């Protein structure tokens, strides 16, 4: 039997939703789920695949706008916000998803898995800039819009490493999960609580989503097996498995939830 009240509770129909890192592995999953639910999707990214990803979404009849945005540059972010307000007149949701987090077995991961005492300080600063400072700049740019609207939702994507130290035994010999990534994701929870306390009186909610691991295609079966042994479900997350949580956080189904985190890690942090 259909339940119209349940559909309304989880509805994002017509909402304008910005997804940073929107052309990436998780960003495109969130975009598809929310787009098929009727939202106006705005992809913020500066990668080569931004236009092609936006085109792919439009072919699925998803309303999608793509903006090339450098999250380290406040002026560019402000300009993107200005154009969105001219186009839509409002911004309903910001999903702060962008992060430097290469797949374990990829070539780009080599430096980011360095021993902590040898971790390049320039790389540390670069990761903090994207993974944490970028979130702050985006919220700073969009908060005044939501404050004026007296409504809005911010979802900051954290990580299991916001709450846990990395079990570096699962990585290859001489490899260690990026200390900058762990530091930034722990900071996301503080950023979330701080903004939630600041924006609550305006009717704006700020929460964090804290996922476990979802393997990119290039991740080896050996790593999947090692990682899977660390949680209660004995597996990694499957593509699309976080979409329900994102829909919940973006919709009125979570209307009395702010300043906290929704953890989806297969029970890893409960052990």
Image (cartoon, grey):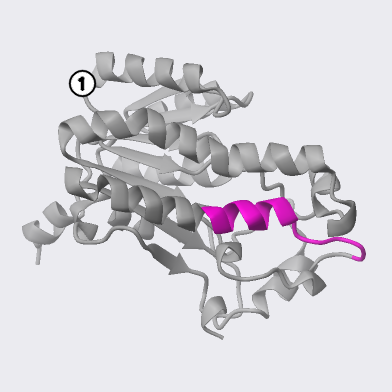
Chain part drawn in magenta = 173-187
Q: Is residue 174 magenta?
A: yes
| Residue assigned mark 1 | 89
Would you place residue 120 above or below residue 253 in this image? above
Return the residue nearer the eye: 127 or 234: 127
247 sits left or right of 134 in the view: left
Does residue 61 appear anywhere in the picture? no
Q: Quadrant of residue 259?
A: bottom left
- The number of callouts visible is 1
Depicted 90 relative to depicted 5: above or below: above
How crowded is the residue under tag 1: few (<14 C-alpha within 10 Å), some, or many (20+)?
few
Q: Is residue 187 left or right of residue 114?
A: left
Whole-percent x, y for residue 225 in the image:
72, 74
Image coords of residue 263 (percent x, y): 45, 68
Judge by depth and name the residue closer to the eye, 189 or 176.
Answer: 189
Image x and y of residue 45, in percent? 54, 28
16 displayed left or right of 174? left
Q: In the rendered view of the protein, which quadrant contains the N terminus?
A: bottom left
- Callout 1: SS: loop
Q: Residue at x 49, y 17 (%)?
A: 76
Q: Is residue 140 left or right of residue 182?
A: left
Residue 113, compared with residue 269, is above or below; it is above
């Amino acid at each position: 039997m259909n339940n119209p009240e349940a559909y309304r509770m989880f509805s994002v129909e017509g909402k304008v939703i910005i997804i940073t890192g929107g052309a990436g592995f998780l960003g495109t999953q969130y975009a598809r789920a929310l787009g098929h639910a009727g939202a106006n999707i705005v992809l913020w990214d500066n990668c080569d695949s931004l236009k092609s990803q936006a085109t792919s979404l439009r072919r699925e009849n998803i309303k999608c706008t793509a903006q090339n945005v450098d999250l380290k540059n406040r002026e560019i972010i402000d300009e993107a916000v200005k154009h969105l307000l001219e186009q839509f007149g409002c911004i309903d949701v910001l999903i702060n998803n962008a992060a430097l987090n290469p797949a374990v077995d990829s070539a780009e991961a080599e430096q980011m898995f360095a021993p902590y005492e040898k971790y390049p300080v320039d790389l540390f600063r670069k990761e903090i800039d994207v993974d944490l400072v970028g979130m702050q700049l985006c919220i700073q740019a969009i908060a005044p819009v939501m404050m004026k609207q007296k409504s809005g939702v911010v979802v900051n994507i954290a990580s299991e490493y916001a709450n846990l130290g990395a079990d570096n035994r699962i990585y290859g010999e001489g490899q260690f999960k990026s200390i900058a990534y762990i530091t930034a994701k722990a900071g996301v929870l503080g950023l979330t609580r701080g903004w939630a306390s600041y924006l609550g009186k305006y009717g704006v909610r700020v929460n964090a989503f804290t996922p476990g691991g979802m393997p990119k295609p290039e991740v080896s079966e050996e790593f999947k097996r090692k990682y899977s042994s660390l949680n209660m479900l004995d597996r990694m997350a499957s593509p699309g498995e976080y979409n329900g949580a994102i829909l919940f956080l973006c919709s009125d189904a979570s209307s009395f939830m702010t300043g906290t985190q929704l953890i989806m890690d297969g029970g890893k942090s409960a052990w």
